[in-house]
Image (cartoon, helix red, strand yellow):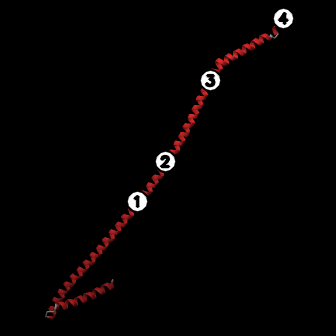
Amino acid sequence: MQSLDIISVNVWNILISLVNLYILYRIVRRFLFKPVQKVLDQRQQEIDDQYARAEKAEADAEESKKAWQARMDAAGREADELLHTASENARSAGDAMIKDARDKAEVIVRQAEEAARLERRKAEEGIRSELAGLSTALAAKMIGREVREADHRAMIDEFIEELGDSGEQDQ
């Protein structure tokens, strides 16, 4: 029977062990588990706060990016409008310069044509005067008498007119 004492179960020992285990559990829970849990909860709260700040920063960054992109788009549109306006202004200024140059060229051509007509008339008048003088002198020598200059000038003018009409028809 001695072997039964070694194998036997002592209820009081089990009960005392359970009470000791319960007391140890309460002590550990009160002095170790709760502070550790409190530290873990604080850590979790800090992590959650960091995640919240990171999400807020990301949202702010996204909002800033959208605002920046909107400003860049507006600046791009404004630059395009400025380029278009400058191009239109340059084109209209160029057209105005070309028109002014053409107008000035037309004026210069008209003045040159008028000057050429005047020079031609002066040359014709000079030739008429000279022909009248020469023909009067020639006629006076040929006839041996003096011809009235007014009659002679009328005949020369008629002759020159006939030459001028035939010259214009040839052209």
Task: Name the residue rendered at 21%, 84% in the picture.
Answer: 128
Residue type at the position of mark 3: Lys
Label 2–label 3 contact, CB within 8 A = no
The answer to whether the residue labelled 2 contacts the one labelled 4, judged by CB atoms less than 8 Å apart, is no
In the rendering, which numbered label is found on residue 2? 4
Nearest the viewer among 95 and 123 is: 95
**Residue 89: numbered disc:** 1
Residue at 66% across, 18% down: 30
Residue reaching furthest left? 145
* Residue 159 position (above or below residue 17): below
Image quadrant of residue 13?
A: top right
Nearer mark to the viewer, of 2 and 3: 3
Q: Position of residue 111 (x, y in %)?
A: 29, 73
SS at mark 2 in the image: helix
Q: CA distance from mark 2 to mark 3?
A: 50 Å
What distance separates the C-alpha of mark 1 from that of mark 4? 122 Å
Q: Residue at 25%, 78% (x, y): give it.
A: 118
Residue 49 versus residue 97 in the image, above or below: above
Horizontally, is 46 left or right of 169 in the view?
right
The residue type indicated by label 4 comes to Gln
Q: Residue at x 74, y 13 (%)?
A: 19
**Amino acid type shown at disc 1:** Asn
Between discs 3 and 1, the one toward the N terminus: 3
Kindly indicate whether the residue at mark 1 contacts the one at mark 3 (C-beta within 8 angstroms).
no
Q: Position of residue 103 (x, y in %)?
A: 34, 69
Q: Within 10 angstroms of label 1, few (less than 14), some, or many (20 or more) residues?
A: few
The nearer-to-camera label among 2 and 4 is: 2
Q: Residues within 10 Å of mark 3 (few under 14, many from 20)?
A: few
Q: Which mark is residue 72?
A: 2
Looking at the image, is mark 2 or mark 4 earlier in the sequence? 4
Q: Could you say which disc has been placed on residue 38 in the image?
A: 3
